[in-house]
Image (cartoon, rainbow, N blue to C red):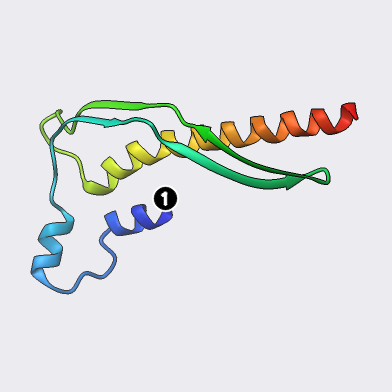
Amino acid sequence: MQNIKSYDSGSKITSEKQKSSSSRKFLVKRVIVAGTQLNVAASALGQSVSQTLPLGDIHLENLGSDGSGISAADISQQILLPLINDAIKQGINILAKQGIKQLEQ
């Protein structure tokens, strides 16, 4: 996420062409991200976990429709944040289940 934010801030752009493309705004009618999966490989409490977990679908509409448009960095952030949050939840859940399984043994 830091990379996206730093790109959007326009850090030391030298040419006019780069300057104009970094400030370009978009109107996005619909974004659908479906069928994504997370491959988890972790170890906790002396037990290894390797599993593929499905992530929730993302449906976004009318990004930048307030009239001023939306930057590419903001679009990326609105898509990636829900994916990252769901991945964290899924990862924590699988590690918690493995921890409980380990304690029951």
**Residue appearing at x 79%, y 33% in the figure:** 99
Q: Nearer the viewer, residue 24 or 40?
A: 40
Residue at the right extreme, as displayed: 105
Q: Which residue is mark 1?
A: 1
Q: Secondary structure at mark 1?
A: loop
60 lies left or right of 42 = left
Relative to 42, say whether 29 is above or below.
Answer: above
Q: Quadrant of the C terminus?
A: top right
**Residue appearing at x 18%, y 57% in the figure:** 22
**Residue 47: percent from left, percent from top:** 79, 43
**Residue appearing at x 59%, y 43% in the figure:** 40
Q: Nearer the viewer, residue 46 or 1?
A: 46
Relative to 73, say whether 18 is above or below.
Answer: below
Q: Quarter-wise, where is residue 67 in the image?
A: top left
Number of numbered tags placed on the structure image: 1
Q: Nearer the viewer, residue 17 or 76?
A: 76
Q: Quarter-wise, where is residue 78 in the image?
A: top left
**Residue 16: percent from left, percent from top:** 9, 69
**Residue 101: percent from left, percent from top:** 81, 29
Q: Nearer the viewer, residue 3 or 105?
A: 105
User: Crowdedness of circle 1 by 10 Å Cα count: few (<14), some, many (20+)?
Assistant: few
Q: Amino acid at mark 1?
A: Met
**Residue appearing at x 31%, y 44% in the figure:** 76
**Residue 4: percent from left, percent from top:** 34, 53
